[in-house]
Image (cartoon, rainbow, N blue to C red):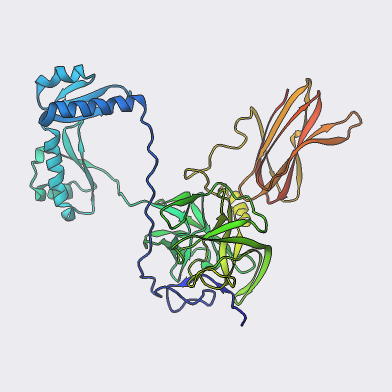
Amino acid sequence: MARTRLLLGIAASTSLVAALAVPVEASTGASSPTTASKPAAAPVAPSPSEDRATRIQKKLRMALGKKFAGAWVAADGRTVTVASTDASSAAAIRKAGATPKTVARSEASLVSTQSALNRKARSAAASVSSWYMDAKTNSVVVETRSVAAAKKFVKASGVNVDSVRIVKSSAKPRPLYDIIGGERYWTPSAGCSVAFSVTNGYITAGHCGDTGESTSGANQVAQGSFGGSSFPGDDYAWVNTNSQWTPTPRVNKWNGTYETVQGATPAAVGARVCRSGSTTNTQIWCGTIQQLNATVNYAEGTVYGLIRTNICADPGDSGGALFTETGGQAQGITSGGSGTCRDGQGSGDSTYFQPVTEVLQILNGQGRQLITGDGPGPGPGYCDSYSTKVTGSISSGANQYQPSGNYTSSASGAHRGCVDGPDGVDFDLYLQKQSTSGTWSTVASSTSPGPDEQVSYNGTAGTYRYRIHAYSGSGSYTVGYTKP
C-alpha cells in the first residue's frame, strides 16, 4: 500500500488547518514538555588577581571566624579589602595582603537577615525585584520600583531595618532561555521544532507558521514571531525572538549532550546525517542522504529542491534540525515524509528536508548569520589574519576580480589569499597571473564545497588577481591577501 507523505507539525487545537498532520501529542498542547539538562560548562582558569583575592578571602574567613564581614576587589583589579567587626583584626588582614575595614555587622549577621527576607519572599510585591548582601555597605540591599512596597516587605520579615538598605531601581528581572536546535516551540495552532539558531532568532519550517504569527517556547513563555515564511514551493521560515531568548550554536542530541554547529557546508548523496526533533526526543535519528533536489507533492502543495533521507520522523518534528553525523554542518529543516519512529527506524521510512542554504542567504542579506562555534555569535573572520582586505557582494553563478581588478608584485615570493563568505553558500577562489600578452591563467585555486577558501603560491614578479566565483548562493564576502 502506498504511504502518504505528511507534513510533520502537530496540532494545538481542533481547528488546525489541513497543512498539519494528525496530532500525536495532546491536542491542547498541555502535555509536559521534555527538557534536557544542560551539560556543565568547562571551568575557566581564574586570572592571577582573581586567584589571589580568592585565596586571601578564604584564608581570612577561616582566621577571623565570626568576626569576618566580607571581602571585595577594587576596580583596579588588585586591591583586596576585607571587612571585620573587630578593629584589632586589622594587623592580621594587612599581613595577609588586604586592606582592613571595620564594620558593625558580620557576614553571618547579613546572611541571617537575607535568610529572613527569603522566608517572606512570597509576600514581596512584584515591584520588589531583588535583595542581596552587599559587603561594601555592610548591609542587605533591597532593590525595588516602589519604596513603600519594599518597606512593607522588610517590616513583614521582622529583620532589623538598620541592616537593610532600600535602593530605588527600574529593573524588571525575567528568566532567560536558550534557543537550541531540535527543541519544541508552539504557535497558537501547532507545535513544531527549532532547526538552527541565527542572529536574533532561529530557522524552522515554513508550514509551521505564517509571517507575523506568534511563538512561545516549550515552556510556554512568549518567544517571538515569524519574521518570514515560505510554503509551498519552499518550506522554510525564520522566527525573530525577544530578548529573553538567546540563540546558541547547539542542537539537542537528547542524551544530555549537544551537537555544536560549525557551519553549513552541503553534504553529498550518501553522506551520514542525523535529525533532531521534539516529538522523537529519546535520541537523534541518523541515516544517509538518499537524493538531493527532490520534489514532494504534499496535499497542501508541491515543494521543490528538498533533501531526501532514509531517516524516520513523526508529527511535531517539523522544523527540526538535520546535520552531518560528524563535523557539525547544518544541512536541512525537517519538512515531511512517510513512516514513523514509533516502531523504530526501518526500510520504509523516508523524510524530506528543506536545505538551509536558501533561507540563510536571505538572512545574510539582512545582516544575520547562522550561529556557529562555542558561543552565541559568529567567531573571528576567516580572513582576519591577513593584513590587506577588500569586500564585495556577489550573485550566484557570477565572477568578480579583486583587488579592484588586479595588483602588481615587484618581487618574487609567496602570494597568499583567502575568501570568507556567508554560511550556506559555495564560493571558490582562484589566483590568476597575467602573461606578457595580456591573457590570464590560473596559478592556484581552492574549490571546496563551502563558503571559505584559501590559496598559496610562490611566484615571480608580475600582475596578479583573485577571481571569486559564486558556485552556488549569493552574498557579501571578504577577500584577504598578502604579496611579496
Residue 476 can be seen, yes or no: yes
Percent position of residue 88, x then y: 9, 20
Residue nearest the observer in this picture, 95 or 204: 95
Residue 238 can be seen, yes or no: no
- Residue extending furthest right? 437
Query: Would residue 227 appear left or right of 96 to someone viewing this image?
Result: right
Query: Would residue 462 appear left or right of 277 to someone viewing this image?
Result: right
Please report the residue visible at 9 percent of the width from the left and 24 percent of the height from the top: 86
Quadrant containing the C terminus is: top right
Placement of 397 over or under 45, stated as above or below: below
Residue nearest the observer in this picture, 281 or 29: 281
Percent position of residue 106, x then y: 12, 32
Quadrant containing the N terminus is: bottom right
The answer to which image quadrant residue 429 occupies is top right
Percent position of residue 45, x then y: 38, 32
- Residue extending furthest bottom? 1
The answer to which image quadrant residue 411 occupies is top right
Placement of 14 over or under 87, stated as above or below: below
Please report the residue visible at 67 percent of the width from the left and 63 percent of the height from the top: 291
Number of marks present in the image shown:
0
Percent position of residue 318, x then y: 52, 66
Query: Would residue 144 appear left or right of 230 to someone viewing this image?
Result: left
Residue nearest the observer in this picture, 260 or 153: 260
